[in-house]
Image (cartoon, rainbow, N blue to C red):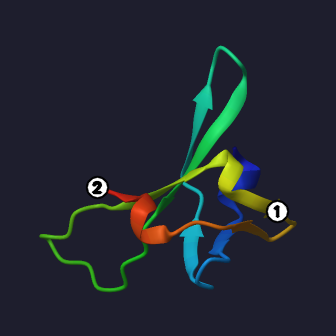
Amino acid sequence: MLEFKELEVINLYNGKILGNVSDLIINMKEGKIEAIIVPESNKIRTIFNTKNEYVILWNEIKKIGEEVILVVHDYESCLQE
């Protein structure tokens, strides 16, 4: 998990840098990663901001490199509160 948290996630769909992995969704029965969680980066935070995060399914990951994870997904549909 620590290795994933160090990697920046880039969406090839629109070229946007989504942020860094904060968590994984793991299928414990199969022992497989099902998705990665990336918090939405918001440069201007207020007390009223809600925490949004991107949930990116494992099959949407196209490449895991030494410094970045490349994904292809319509990011608006993967943003969850």
The residue indicated by pointer 2 is 81
Residue in the foreground of this view, choosing between 30 and 19: 30
Between residues 25 and 78, which one lies in front from this camera angle?
78
Q: Which mark identifies residue 63? A: 1
* Nearer the observer, 5 or 60: 60
Circle 2 crowding by C-alpha within 10 Å: few under 14, some 14–19, many from 20: few
Which x, y percent locates residue 58? 67, 47
67 on left or right of 78:
right
**Against 5, is 58 above or below?**
above
Count neighbours of disc 1 (C-alpha within 10 A) and say few if under 14, some if 14 to 19, many if 20 or more.
few
State left or right for residue 59 relative to residue 19. Answer: right
Along the horizontal axis of the image, is 4 left or right of 77?
right
N-terminal of the pair, mark 2 or mark 1, is 1
What secondary structure is found at the residue carrying circle 2?
A: loop
Question: Outermost residue, top direction?
Answer: 29
Give the x, y percent position of residue 46.
Answer: 18, 77
Residue 66, compared with residue 25, is above or below; it is below
Q: Quadrant of the C terminus?
A: bottom left
Residue furthest to the right in view is 66
Identify residue type, mark 1. Answer: Lys
Give the residue at x 12% y 70%. 48
Q: Which mark is residue 75?
A: none
Q: Quadrant of residue 31?
A: top right
Q: Residue at x 69, y 44 (%)?
A: 1
Say which amino acid is labelled 2.
Glu
The residue lying furthest to the left in this view is 48
Which residue does the image show at 62% across and 74% down from the upper left? Answer: 11
For the residues labelled 2 and 1, the Cα–Cα distance comes to 26 Å
For residue 22, above or below residue 28: below
Q: Which residue sits at x=67%, y=70%?
A: 8
Q: Are marks 2 and 1 in contact (CB under 8 Å)?
A: no
Which is nearer the eye, 77 or 5? 77
